[in-house]
Image (cartoon, grey):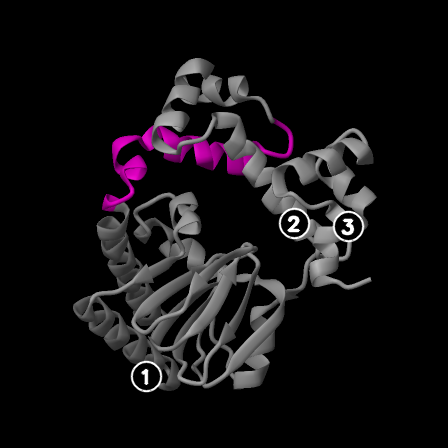
Amino acid sequence: MANHPVRKMDEFRLELKAEHEVLYYPLEGNQEIIKPHSHNFLLLALFESGSGEHTIDFVKHKVRSKQLHIVFPDQLHSWKLGEDTKLHQLMIDKAVFDKIMNAFRFSFSVYKNTPVFDLTDAEYEALYKEFILQKEALATENTFKDVIIARLWLIALMTSEIGARVFDDLTVYQAQPIIVDYLALVEKHFLEERGIAFYAGLLNITANYLNILCKKYCLVKATDLIKDRVILEAKRLLISGLSIKETCYELNFSDVPYFSRFFKLQTGKTPKAFRNMYIPS
C-alpha cells in the first residue's frame, strides 16, 4: 500500500547484465543511501568489514565487521557506510523467497525486530563460504536453478541457527510464542483492528491475559505494540510523498487532527515536522 521509493530487482539485473532470480551484488568503500527506500526482494547483506550506520524501518544499527543484516521486502532502509566497508549482498526475488521462506524457522516479525546479527568467527566463515559458492554458481552458465535454491535454503537454515543463538537471549521469543503470534496478527490486521479484544479472541485467550504477557515480556501494554505498528506505517507513508490528509485516510483515522495528535503523542513530533526531516519543504 505504501508509495515510498521502491528499488526493483530488474534495476539490478540491468546493471549487472544478469537475468537470474538471485543476484550477488558486492559493495566496497564509502556508500550512502540518503532517502530511505524499500525493495521488492529479500536482501541478505554480509559485512566482511565495515563501519557506519544502517537504518532499517527508522531504527539505526551500528555497522561492524562480521555482521549479517536482513532487509525484507517493503521494509524501508538507508545507510551511511565507511570507507572500510566490504559487503557481500544476495538479492532474492520474491518468487524464490517464497520457495525458501520455511527455512527461516522463526516468525518474520522476530527477524524484523532483530534484523542485524553479530556473528562469531565460525558463523561468519560458514556464511561467507556459502555466499561465495552462490556467487560462483550464478556466474556459471547452465547452473541448475535447483542448485541455487538449495544453497539459499542452506543459507536460510544457517541464519535460523544463528537466530536461535541470538534469540535465546531474547526470552520473549523462547518463553512466549503467544507474543510472536500476536505480533504476526498485528502485522496482518493493524489497519482495521486497533483493539486488543480482537487479537485476544484469535489467540483464544482473554484480553487481560494478553496484556499481562506483553507487560511481562515486552515491558509495554498490548495496545502499545499495535500503536508502534501504526506509527511505523505512518512514517513510511509520510516520507513517500503522500499528504498528511492522504496518510490519515490510508491508516483509517477518522480525521486529520486526531491523526496528528496521535502521531505527536507517540513520536514527540508533528507529522509535518517528521516529514520535513526527510523531505524538506
Residue appearing at x 56%, y 76% in the figure: 32
Q: Which region shows up in magenta?
A: 168-193
Crowd rating for badge 3 (residues with CA inside 10 Å; few <14, some 14–19, many 20+): some
Amino acid type, mark 2: Lys
- Given residues 195 and 279, the one toward you in this image is 279
Q: Which residue is mark 2?
A: 235
Alpha carbon of mark 1 to alpha carbon of mark 3: how far?
48 Å
Residue 92 spot, x, y in % from top left: 45, 66
The question of residue 28 being in magenta is answered with: no
Q: Secondary structure at mark 2?
A: helix
Q: Which residue is mark 1?
A: 136
- Secondary structure mainly formed by the magenta segment: helix
Residue 140 spot, x, y in % from top left: 35, 86
Amino acid type, mark 3: Lys
Residue appearing at x 69%, y 34% in the figure: 262
Instruction: Name, please, the residue furthest toward the front.
Output: 268
Inspect this view and state whether residue 18 appears. Answer: yes
Q: Earlier in the sequence, mark 1 or mark 2?
A: 1
Residue appearing at x 74%, y 32% in the figure: 253
Residue appearing at x 39%, y 34% in the figure: 218
